[in-house]
Image (spheres, helix red, strand yellow):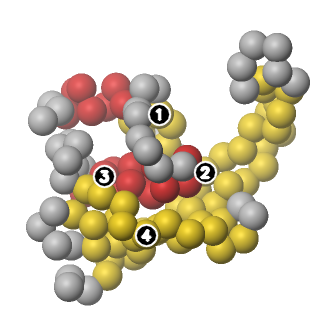
Amino acid sequence: MLTRSAFRRFVFRTSGRLGSTSYSSTWPGPAQVAELAVRRALDETDLDALSVTRHEAVTEHAWSTTVVHRDGRRWQVGVLSEPTDIQRAESCDKPLKELRRWTWSVEALPVG
């Protein structure tokens, strides 16, 4: 189990945005954002407490994700990728690309 201080190294707490330093997941970026948004809302630091059970694209830059806690609680998370004025390369020798900002909304679902 991660301590609160160790978990904060993974997640930057900003107003309405999350950034990750070394978070590893099998889910694509938008699903990771959804999971981290629920972690932030719950202040959940146990890495095994949450799982993504459904993830689908709604539009090119919008996704819907269901996140479930091991105790049965569930959340529907809407994730948007919005443009910024910042350009950066994804890695060495790659062309500059528009950096996008993640935003989300979290809605509790009935248990079950």
Badge 3 element:
helix
Circle nearer the N terminus (3, 4): 3
Seen at 31% across and 31% down, the residue is: 8
Q: Type of residue at label 2?
A: Trp
Contact, mark 2 vs mark 3 (Cβ under 8 Å): no
Q: In which quarter of the view is residue 52 placed? A: bottom left
Q: Secondary structure at mark 2?
A: strand
Closer to the camera, 27 or 7?
27
Residue drawn 19% across and 53% down? 49
Looking at the rendered structure, the kind of residue marked 1 is Ser
Q: Residue at x 87, y 24 (%)?
A: 95
Q: Secondary structure at mark 1?
A: strand
Rate crowding at label 2 as few (under 14), some (14 to 19) or many (20 or more) other CA atoms within 10 Å: some
Asked if disc 3 and disc 1 are in contact, CB closer than 8 Å, the reply is no
Disc 4 versus disc 1: distance between alpha carbons? 21 Å
| 38 up-or-down from 107: above or below | above
Q: Tell me, yes or no, if residue 98 can be seen here.
A: yes
Write down the residue under mark 2. Answer: 102
- The CA distance from mark 2 to mark 3 is 15 Å
Residue 73, quarter of the rendered image: bottom left
Residue 56: x and y in percent read 56, 69
Q: Which mark is residue 85?
A: none
> Which residue is label 3 attached to?
39
* Disc ID at residue 54: 4
Rounded to the nearest whole Å, what is the CA distance between mark 2 and mark 4?
19 Å
Precedes in sequence: disc 2 or disc 4: 4
- The count of marks equals 4
Residue pointed to by mark 1 = 20
Between discs 3 and 1, the one toward the N terminus: 1
| Quadrant of the rendering where the C terminus is positioned | bottom left
Residues under labels 3 and 1: Cα distance? 13 Å
